[in-house]
Amino acid sequence: MKVAIIGGKLQGLEAAYLAGKAGWDVTIIDRAPDVPAAGLCHQFLLADIANQTDLKRFLQPFDLIIPALENHDALACLQNCEQNDRTRILFDFDAYAITSSKIESDKLLAGIHIPTPSSYPDGGFPVIVKPSRSSGSKGICVVHDSKQLESHLATAPGEQVIQKFVHGPSYSLEIIGYPENYCPLQVTELEVDPVFDCKRVIAPSGLSQKMIADFEHIAVTTANALKLKGLMDVEVILDHEVLRVLEIDARLPSQTPITVHTSTGVNMLQLLAGQHCRPSHNGADIAVAQRGVVYEHIRVSGSTLVVTGEHAMASAGPLHLEEDFFGADEAITSQTGNRTDWVATLIISAENRTTAWEKREAVIADIMRFFNLDNYRDHSPIHHDADEPSLTLKGSFK
């Protein structure tokens, strides 16, 4: 199958990896020449979708189109092409129009009584402020008093969402399907860096079966309210045994699909391409085949290894896939023999979560020794509560 992935940044990297695992012929299309996914495809086309005079003809050679970007003009052109030509585009434009706005998403969730963090001022301080139309950690800020909030809003562009800052572990769940026929996939645990950018995904999640069932109910209820046709990602935080939804996104996410594929063998792109979902079959597969996985991003610079958010991967230029990378099953990396400044996404799996973490520790130690590194950093967001640590630093590899 010949597939065109529109966008070569982090979503495109995810799509290229999964499409490669499916055995498809992969072309990346992007208006920038040095995007990360350019190293994980069979062909790269330098082009701006929004400026194509005959987009139908441009896309005609491909069996499948996979949008992996959030550019409004490009998505509008693809939507118009789909309406006029029935081009096979794996994207739910209507659902995305709602979930791309955190304000509209919160209205939807409130209407179906899905728990979310309290909106300001109901929950008091600290609060987290997020741009309504932004993905990932871009523009996120934790604010601790009204003076700081006023100052931040005076300089923050666009509409902002202000919610109670909740301490607790975060989790993600993808759901695929069509109204009244949805398949929740695997729950994964998320860990973030000091600027709330995801640095690590762990599977299985470690949640109880009851909490997983609650999460699946949230995902299915939300998907039905959206009339989702395709894929959606739901991110929650656990707040004293209550799962509160932080974000919903009706698009291919980054990081978690590769983790789910490594843990369960389920390839989300193949499910989407099949134009249907078989909940009982896929659910059974996930129930019996969950390997332990640690998926994380690192940067090596000088004498230091830093566990970092995925933003480091976005600016590293074309990346390539390596197997058995210092003991990791795979790595998506910029590392070459003579580079002293490089990044990698480590994909590490074992028979269970505990063993996968032990294997991960050995991988990090091997990298530290091979490159003669002296410093290891793995920081988490600073907490100001008296009963919580101000810094998380895991492991010692000197």
Image (tube, rainbow, N blue to C red):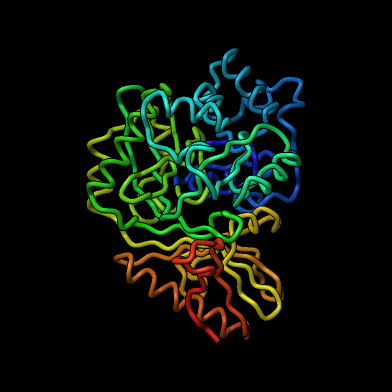
Residue lying furthest top: 84
Give the residue drawn at x 65%, y 22%.
76
Residue 289, relative to residue 349: is it above or below? above
The picture quadrant where one finds residue 301 is: bottom right
Residue 70, relative to residue 395: is it above or below? above
Q: Nearer the viewer, residue 65 or 201?
A: 201
Residue 46, relative to residue 80: is it above or below? below
The picture quadrant where one finds residue 30 is: top right
Q: Nearer the viewer, residue 276 or 345?
A: 345
- Can residue 9 be seen? no
391 relative position to 153: left or right: left
- On the image, the x and y values in percent for residue 248 come to 47, 36
Give the residue drawn at x 48%, y 74%.
394
Q: Nearer the viewer, residue 23 or 362?
A: 362
Residue 212, relative to residue 274: is it above or below? below
- Can residue 255 be seen? yes
22 relative position to 207: left or right: right
- On the image, the x and y values in percent for residue 7 come to 64, 39
- On the image, the x and y values in percent for residue 360 come to 44, 72
